[in-house]
Amino acid sequence: MRTVLTSCPFCGCGCGLYVHARDGIPSGVAASQHHPVSQGRLCARGWSAHAAAAWGPRLTRPMLRRDGELRGADWGEALDTAARGLARLRSSGRSIGVIASPRLTNEESYLAVRLARGALGTPHIDAPLRAEFALALAGIGEVSGVASSRGTLQDVEASDAILLVEGDLAASHPRAASAITRAVAAGAKLVCCGPAATQMSRLATLSFTWRPGAETDSLAPLIAGALAAGAGEPGAGQLAAGLDALRASLAAIAVGDQARAAARWLVEAARPSVVVAPFPAAPAAVRRVTVAVANLAALCGGLGRPGSALLVLPTRSNAQGSLDMGVTPEALPGGRPLDDGGLRDRLAAAWGTAVTADRGVDAADMVGQTSGLVIVGDALAGGVPPVGPAGEALSGSELVVVLDAFASPALDAADVVLPVAAAIESSGTVTGADGWLRRVRPGGDPPGEARGAWWVLAELGRRLGLGGGPDSPDQVLEEIANVVPGYRGVDRGALDTGWGVLLPAPPVDRAALQPLPAPASPSDDRIVMLDGVYDWGSDPLVDHAPILCRDERSRRKLFPRGQVAMAPGDAEALGVRQGWLVKLVSNHGEAVLPVVLRRELAPGRLSVPFAFRYMLADVLAGMPSASVRVERV
């Protein structure tokens, strides 16, 4: 039996685990007792990190579409066909997009950017859920000057006051929820803010629920309360620019007793921390929320203070590394602006070709709207981008090249299929939300003729004219360490012998406080919102894991027509019972769904699981919430 230490491929917490393999096939996992993040514990997903690779419908050989059907081919023929098709589109000036999974290693993500902005000359490269995560970090950057998280989960666990902004942390990031739970058990005060009651809000010392579309209205009283408690005065917190403008924006905010108490806990804490987990909201609202929490962290002195954390947790395991490597249509590697001539020159020297520095389109706009599309990894899993059935959505592209470990709906539209290693079989590095660069080691061998995604991307680059391609993931990491800001000079020895390397982060000496928007107008409208931001049930690492898939498959069988949850009082007023049908009517469209009663929902709030988002598509029109009229059917 072979046993290797690697990083969990699910959420962005960065847990370490050991993978056991028999005859090259992953057969089980064990928690790393001394890993600083997992500390001998794993969530249910982590304990099944090996299962999909062992039991899922694996792709084992390259395939080409011939006479309308995918048929086996050898690697040379498949790579040549993909490269010729992409070169033809490139030379004719037609658009090509690259969508890369945020589960890829840093090395694979970097090579995907190299392929897009170098070999293909296209700015259209993106990752699912990238925009929301990047906007959240940008909100932090508006205040701190650095668009990145600060601190670790160990800091959170040692905090004496914690502000948690969440959709449902216990579901999205169980290990982070455990860290907060242990902090509360040790006496920490927990303040929760979010769109609905959750497991963590029930644990909280105080919790505040916001109305979708008015997210910062629940945070404004906390900031006003912090100012009233002395935050921002000389000698309190981090002296900051913009204090007068912030005070002015809060002049009309009423601070209740609960908000005053919560603010006082955060201001008086020796180690205050803020954790932001994914929550359903419009992109602009995500940024407004993180601006607000960064304001509060700065006022409480928690920006960069040793022992304090300001963590923005991404949904997928290497979303931070993906963004750092440049998997975004809006920036170069390292988060540098597109007009950074010095970085473009370094990249051009490393790649042997000019670097496209135009601004591209995001993943949702690429699907079905570009002439060519390269999909790397499980990029269309989880319903992001919200394309509906992948085969239909991709049918508008002339050429679709898929690099994946598993058979997926994207194969219905694929012209070239290139089988790659699963996440648990990959080699390279990932970057956690806490800024730690960690090793990913192969816990098994790819089946059949499947190869590492880094190799496939490098071979495509060679065939498209890039010279001097890498021969190993370590060579890619060496190039990253030479050219990518924030990763330059990475200590490979420490990376290989320890738990990882903490990437350098610029200090925050003086924050720039930002005014908050005016409070939203009161409304009695009923609001329907999506519950969650990601469909774990359709994630291949969940759907193909025999234990993990049971819950979601059971729910889909139990509710084949979807469901909408409402408070019992609302159902009684409407004259409906559980299981009865109601019609939701918005300004955009309507949908009919059966009712499920949930006591924790506030009156006037309705909730639909993210897994059933397609059934609500006409009502939401691409947004996570909408005002609706509810009618009994």
Image (spheres, rainbow, N blue to C red):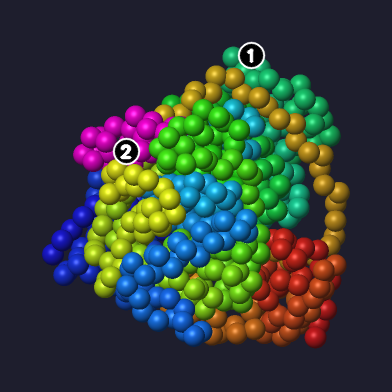
Q: Residue at x 28, y 66 (%)?
A: 446
Which quadrant of the view contains residue 298?
Answer: top right
Q: Position of residue 21 (x, y in %)?
A: 20, 65
* Residue 392: image location, x then y, percent: 61, 77
Which SS class for mark 2? helix
- Which SS class for mark 1? loop
Q: Is residue 432 left or right of residue 564?
A: left
**Closer-to-camera residue (509/156):** 509
The image's mark for residue 478 is 2
Classify residue 386 as left or right of residue 376: right
Q: Position of residue 572 (x, y in %)?
A: 77, 77
Q: Is residue 501 visible?
A: yes
Q: Is residue 486 magenta?
A: yes
Which residue does the image show at 61% across and 33% down from the upper left?
A: 339
Q: Which residue is mark 1?
A: 234
Q: Residue at x 47, y 63 (%)?
A: 84
Can the viewer see residue 44 in this picture? no
Q: Label 1 to label 2, Cα distance in Å? A: 46 Å
The stretch of residues the image draws in magenta is 476-503
- Please name whichever residue, 382 or 163, is drawn nearer the observer in this view of the structure: 382
